[in-house]
Image: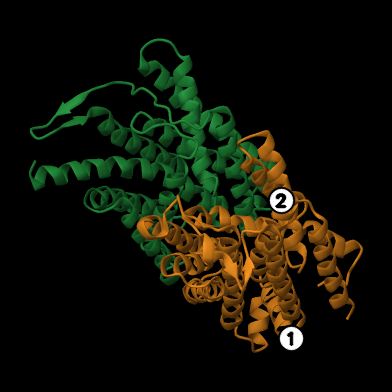
Chain colours: A green, B orange
């Protein structure tokens, strides 16, 4: 295989990871943008979505596509409901104090991870892909499902954009983002908007998880890497800026795909984390974000 | 005076306890004391100065490898190893602080977390030297600390107690000094203290470096006392544990981290007898503390019983 096709493969792999990354990062960015809190448990919600997908897919009879579709509906609902519960019972009582929220969501992260360890167990388990189509290119064959993931992620993201820009709930979210107190004065139920936003962010992580499990596997610690990458994406894109997050997800996903083809993945992770720390230090509004 | 007598009495009580405890619990106490040194330093930054760092595992690991690598690779003595680890923790903390302290609040937390993560990955990346997850096992001459054999329970506990006593008294002197007042001022109102002529960056950098010295000596001591240094100690969990100990014992109290470390250690010890998912206890403790008892055990005591406690 020559260099050209090799690069093409790297770019395709990069596109897939960019798509999944965009979905997880957008949820994190949404929560940060509207509620001004950092949700450390975001990776745990991702993991939970995968575990629920595995559970649902295992309990639906018939061809794998039914189980997978059922998971795509059930997992975001379950995870979203749980997130709303966390918001109402914990975050709201903390008055969304940013540092207290980080401590509390670290706690939630441990609770969810360990609950998964106790119920799901320490093994990695596969979930069957809804279809097995193989695209035969002149140089290599490529999984059709992976390309479907890219398309599906784009569709979901378009849906999020429509929700934010064109619906009443999106308007309420944007109003709350701009000024919580004024929004309240105009009769917006800010508590409900917050619970909804937190649930939506977690549900997006769950959707990403359902999309990704047929490619990778379900494991109770699988949330750590996506959390870190989503953090990186959100920070590079500018905390709270959805468009920046998307651009950053593409850049990071593609470069991660290409870099880890040629270099050690650990080394590329070290470089990425250091870069992120430096971006936050020297350009806290992010590379694409407006001045705060 | 009352304050000093009280803390000396606590140390004497610890020494008596150390003599009476059966082997298993004496060993636990040595671990708790080393973790308490770590958390006492963390609490100087977090509880007294208001810097919520998520990167202290890096300083702990700097101390741990700062001691373990020279001792295992070049046969350095344990005592110089301990000193090297102490300095390494402080130096790394100062270097991180120079960059990270340009940010505050949530950004500070994320920046320190990222630096620590990069440190953890670096330990993994150089696994031929550091041993990665397998780690380094120290043995023989490397564990003779100033003529005391660290493989024996008695001397080990004595050294742990000595290190903790030194750390406790230094912390007490620090928070009671004029500089300690400035630290509190940074926590309460940074802008106002800036207006009064203090430089928040320098004060916070100094405290972070001191806090790093504590983490360094704790890491080095942990490696030498228990004969093992591994990548696990540089993971994010070891940034969260000192925060948890401080929160539980009482952020902004000198003795709180020891109480928190002891309580949490035995909580996890009991939980791990029941289930493999013993970290569940850590998660529940974090949520419950931050929701219902943000002042911690000693904070509560200070509020109601002993208002003079530093």
Q: Which residue is painted at 22% across and 41% down in the image? A: A12
Position of B209 relative to B237 (above/below): below
Q: Are the residues under marks 1 and 2 on the same chain?
A: yes
The label on residue B217 is: none
Q: Could you tell me which secondary element the residue under label 1 belongs to?
A: helix
In front of the other: B207 or A27? B207
**Side (left or right) of A133 relative to A283:** left
Instruction: Give the x, y percent position of residue B83.
Output: 56, 76
For disc 1, the marked residue is: B178
Quarter of the image for the N terminus of chain B: give it: bottom right
Q: Which residue is painted at 77% across and 50% down in the image? A: B292
Q: Residue furthest top?
A: A62
Q: Which residue is painted at 67% across and 43% down in the image? A: B281
Position of A143 relative to A234 (above/below): above
Among the 4 quarters of the image, the one containing residue B307 = bottom right
Instruction: Give the x, y percent position of residue A50.
Output: 46, 31
Q: Could you tell me which secondary element the residue under label 2 belongs to?
A: helix
In front of the other: B182 or B118? B118
Mark closer to the chain start, 1 or 2: 1
For disc 2, the marked residue is: B264
The disc numbered 2 marks a residue on which chain?
B
At label 2, counting other C-alpha atoms closer than 10 Å, the crowd grade (few under 14, some 14-19, many 20 or more) is many
Quarter of the image for the C terminus of chain B: give it: bottom right
In front of the other: B260 or B26? B26
Q: Residue furthest bottom?
A: B197
**Side (left or right) of B269 relative to A10:** right
Q: CA distance from mark 1 to mark 2?
A: 32 Å
Q: Are marks 1 and 2 in contact (CB under 8 Å)?
A: no
């Amino acid at each position: 295989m020559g260099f050209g096709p090799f690069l093409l493969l790297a770019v395709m792999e990069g596109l897939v990871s960019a798509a999944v990354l965009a979905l997880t990062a957008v949820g994190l960015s949404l929560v940060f943008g509207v509620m001004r809190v950092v949700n450390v448990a975001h990776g745990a919600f991702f993991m939970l979505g995968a575990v629920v997908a595995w559970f649902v897919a295992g309990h639906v009879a018939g061809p794998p596509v039914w189980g997978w579709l059922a998971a795509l509906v059930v997992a975001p609902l379950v995870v979203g409901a749980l997130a709303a519960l966390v918001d109402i019972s914990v975050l709201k009582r903390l008055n969304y104090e940013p540092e207290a929220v980080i401590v509390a969501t670290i706690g939630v992260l441990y609770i969810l991870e360990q609950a998964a360890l106790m119920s799901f167990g320490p093994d990695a388990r596969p979930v069957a892909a809804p279809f097995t189509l193989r695209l035969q290119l002149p140089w290599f064959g490529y999984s059709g499902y992976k390309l479907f993931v890219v398309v599906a992620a784009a569709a979901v993201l378009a849906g999020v954009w429509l929700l934010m820009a064109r619906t009443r709930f999106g308007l309420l979210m944007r109003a709350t983002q701009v000024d919580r107190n004024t929004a309240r004065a105009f009769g917006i139920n800010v508590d409900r908007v917050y619970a909804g936003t937190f649930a939506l962010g977690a549900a997006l992580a769950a959707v990403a998880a359902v999309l990704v499990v047929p490619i990778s596997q379900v494991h109770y610690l699988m949330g750590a890497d996506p959390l870190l990458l989503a953090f990186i994406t959100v920070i590079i894109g500018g905390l709270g800026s959805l468009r920046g997050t998307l651009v950053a997800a593409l850049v990071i996903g593609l470069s991660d795909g290409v870099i880890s083809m040629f270099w050690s993945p650990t080394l590329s992770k070290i470089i990425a984390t250091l870069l992120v720390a430096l971006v936050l230090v020297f350009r806290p509004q992010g590379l694409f974000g407006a001045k705060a | 005076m009352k304050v000093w007598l009280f803390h000396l009495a606590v140390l004497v009580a610890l020494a008596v306890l150390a003599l009476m405890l059966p082997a298993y619990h004496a060993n636990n106490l040595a671990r708790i004391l080393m973790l308490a040194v770590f958390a006492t330093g963390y609490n100087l930054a977090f509880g007294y100065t208001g810097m919520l760092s998520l990167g202290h595992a890096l300083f702990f690991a700097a101390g741990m490898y700062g001691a373990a690598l020279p001792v295992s690779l070049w046969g350095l003595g344990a005592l110089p190893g301990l000193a090297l680890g102490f300095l390494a923790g402080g130096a790394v903390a100062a270097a991180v602080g120079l960059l990270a302290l340009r940010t505050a609040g949530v950004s500070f937390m994320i920046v320190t977390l990222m630096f620590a993560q990069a440190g953890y990955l670096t330990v993994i990346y150089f696994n031929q030297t550091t041993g990665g997850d397998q780690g380094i096992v120290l043995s023989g001459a490397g564990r003779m600390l100033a003529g005391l054999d660290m493989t024996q329970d008695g001397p080990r506990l004595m050294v742990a107690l000595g290190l903790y006593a030194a750390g406790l008294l230094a912390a007490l002197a620090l928070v009671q000094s004029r500089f300690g007042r400035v630290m509190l001022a940074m926590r309460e109102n940074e802008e106002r203290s800036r207006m009064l002529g203090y430089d928040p960056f320098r004060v916070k950098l100094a405290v972070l470096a001191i806090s790093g010295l504590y983490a360094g000596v704790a890491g080095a001591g942990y490696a030498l006392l228990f004969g093992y240094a591994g990548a696990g100690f540089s993971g994010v969990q070891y940034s969260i544990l000192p925060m948890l100990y401080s929160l539980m014992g009482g952020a902004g109290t000198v003795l709180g981290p020891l109480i928190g470390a002891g309580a949490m250690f035995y909580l996890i010890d009991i939980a791990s007898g029941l289930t493999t998912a013993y970290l569940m206890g850590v998660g529940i403790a974090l949520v419950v503390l931050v929701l219902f008892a943000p002042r911690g055990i000693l904070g509560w005591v200070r509020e109601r019983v002993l208002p003079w406690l530093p």
